């Protein structure tokens, strides 16, 4: 199956809050938190931004980067755990805003932080079987942590879009294969109508993240007979800075392979955008011929692993849209009071 | 300005999402919002749909401190008349710190929430503008 990435685009809101400013409000020790999470600040959406607006900006960036006719897009799938409506799709808003409607299919995806990579896999299937010319897979979130909850230090906002196609001359990266590992585990959830998610504390580590990332990553390397040293870069879901580095080590990847795509320390956890943002940051700097290994994780739970090889075309389109580094530059910092207003933590009556 | 009926907003949604207006092939004039008839050429006008790039500049602006219902938590914010490069002028919120806005400033479009009908109603999306340098 020779399908791959035709273009990609990322979006990060302009605002940031520093971990130390959140810690001060709750009387936590910022130094210990920063060392433990390896996150110093996180992105915050503007008052008029949500998952739909972020998904649209990421999608428009992907279309602009390789100058694609949006009418060629036959499928739009948006993965998120913070869709603006409980009932009404985000993907139709995106499709209309990029001009792909009406002859196309659309749906919203959910599987915690790997909803976006599940959308990539669906697009790979549709494109690979010639059901559509191009598929657009987006991972976007404006994630919430309850005030004072550990998640509040990392829950961030951002989104990434990938255009999936199969025309050889258009591919900037070939996705050689993908492999998923899925079980049912109650590590993280949010019930209908609740503002903030619940999580099962330590349960999210070993039986959640590590088991599923290792299951998918080892499964893929075994299936296509590759090993960590075959890859120039490795990207793992980054809920914090520690987990991806630890799982990389367990799997036999080294720090140098992981670091180029490790954007969590200045961005926070963008949930459905997390692993996809890491892949985008890696594509921003990869050379033709480079190989990228990536594994997303979503609580609930599952891991999606991908083996990717960059083509010569990356050089032609790379500068057509802002890089992840461009989006991380020049943030506007806010204090906790302004942050609470932006995140709707203060309920206005 | 936006708390109109759901159906009324929806009919204009495509224009708001993508800044789609009209262009008169007869006199070369551009219009936003779109028109059914060219006011200059009248019956002789040849109108076609036109998608604006959204690039333009600030003609004038005002900083809103006391906002309309639904916008209270956004104050202070900037409302401006933007002149698109093709000519039409439109009123829009500008996503910028009030201290940074200037007449003549170059702007480009962004996709944002324009408003919402409380917690139960629709969320309205469309185009706002940000400084071009961002
Ligand atoms: Zn005319």
Image: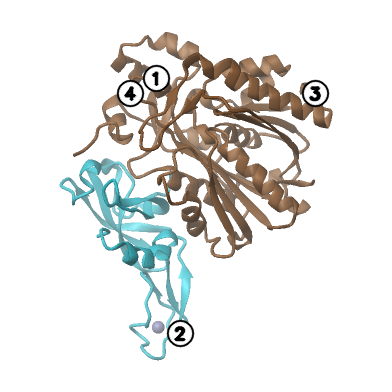
The disc placed on residue B46 is: 2
* Mark 1 or mark 3, whichever is nearer to me: 3
Q: Horizontal placement of A187 versus A236: left or right? A: left
Residue A317 on image: x %, y %: 65, 48
Q: Earlier in the sequence, mark 3 or mark 4?
A: 4
Gap between marks 1 and 3, in whole Å?
37 Å
Q: In front: mark 1 or mark 2?
A: 1
Q: Chain of mark 2?
A: B
Between disc 1 and disc 3, whose residue precedes? 1
Is there CB contact under 8 Å for labels 3 and 4?
Answer: no
Residue bearing the label numbered 1:
A19
Q: Is residue B31 left or right of residue A169?
A: left
Disc 1/disc 4 C-alpha distance (Å): 13 Å
- Which of the two labelled residues, at mark 1 and mark 4, occupies the earlier sequence position? 1
Q: Tell me the colour chain B is drawn in.
A: cyan
Q: Which chain is disc 3 placed on?
A: A
> Which residue is painted at 30% across and 26% down in the image?
A335
Q: CA distance from mark 3 to mark 4?
A: 42 Å
């Amino acid at each position: 199956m020779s399908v791959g990435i035709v273009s990609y685009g990322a979006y990060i809101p302009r605002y940031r809050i520093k971990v130390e400013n959140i810690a001060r409000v709750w009387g936590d020790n910022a130094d210990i938190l920063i060392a433990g999470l390896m996150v110093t600040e996180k992105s915050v959406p503007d008052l008029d931004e949500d998952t739909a607006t972020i998904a649209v900006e990421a999608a428009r960036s992907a279309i602009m980067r390789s100058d694609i006719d949006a009418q060629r897009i036959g499928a739009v799938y948006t993965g998120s755990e913070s869709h603006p409506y409980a009932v009404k799709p985000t993907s139709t808003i995106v499709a209309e805003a990029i001009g792909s409607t009406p002859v196309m299919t659309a749906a919203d995806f959910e599987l915690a932080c790997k909803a976006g990579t599940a959308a990539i896999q669906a697009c790979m299937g549709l494109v690979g079987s010639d059901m559509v010319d191009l598929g657009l897979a987006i991972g976007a979130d404006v994630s919430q942590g309850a005030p004072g909850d550990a998640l509040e230090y990392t829950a961030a906002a951002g989104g990434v879009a990938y255009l999936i196609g199969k025309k050889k001359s258009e591919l900037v990266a070939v996705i050689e294969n993908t492999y998923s590992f899925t079980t049912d585990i109650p590590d993280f959830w949010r019930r209908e109508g609740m503002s903030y998610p619940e999580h099962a504390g330590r349960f999210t580590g070993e039986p959640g993240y590590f088991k599923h990332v290792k299951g998918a990553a080892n499964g893929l390397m075994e299936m296509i007979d590759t090993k960590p040293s075959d890859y120039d870069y490795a990207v793992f879901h980054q809920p914090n800075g520690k987990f991806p580095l630890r799982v990389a080590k367990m799997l036999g990847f080294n720090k140098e392979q992981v670091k180029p795509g490790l954007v969590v320390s200045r961005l926070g956890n963008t949930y459905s955008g997390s692993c996809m943002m890491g892949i985008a940051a890696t594509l921003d700097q990869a050379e033709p011929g480079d190989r990228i290994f990536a594994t997303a994780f979503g609580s609930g739970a599952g891991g999606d692993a991908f083996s990717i090889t960059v083509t010569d075309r990356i050089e032609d389109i790379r500068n057509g849209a802002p890089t992840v580094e461009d989006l991380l530059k020049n943030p506007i910092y806010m204090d906790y009071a302004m942050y609470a207003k932006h995140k709707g933590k203060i309920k206005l009556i | 300005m936006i708390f109109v009926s759901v159906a009324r907003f929806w009919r204009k949604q495509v224009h708001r999402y993508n800044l789609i207006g009209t262009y008169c092939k007869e006199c070369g004039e551009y219009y936003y919002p779109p028109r059914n008839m060219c006011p200059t050429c009248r019956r002789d006008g040849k109108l076609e749909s036109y998608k604006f790039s959204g690039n333009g500049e600030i003609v004038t602006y005002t900083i809103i401190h006391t906002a309309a219902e639904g916008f209270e938590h956004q104050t202070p914010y900037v409302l401006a008349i933007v002149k698109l490069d093709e000519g039409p002028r439109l009123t829009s919120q500008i996503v910028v710190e009030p201290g940074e806005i200037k007449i003549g400033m170059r702007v480009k479009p962004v996709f944002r929430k324009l408003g919402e009908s409380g917690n139960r109603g629709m969320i309205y999306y469309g185009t706002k503008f940000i400084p071009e340098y961002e």
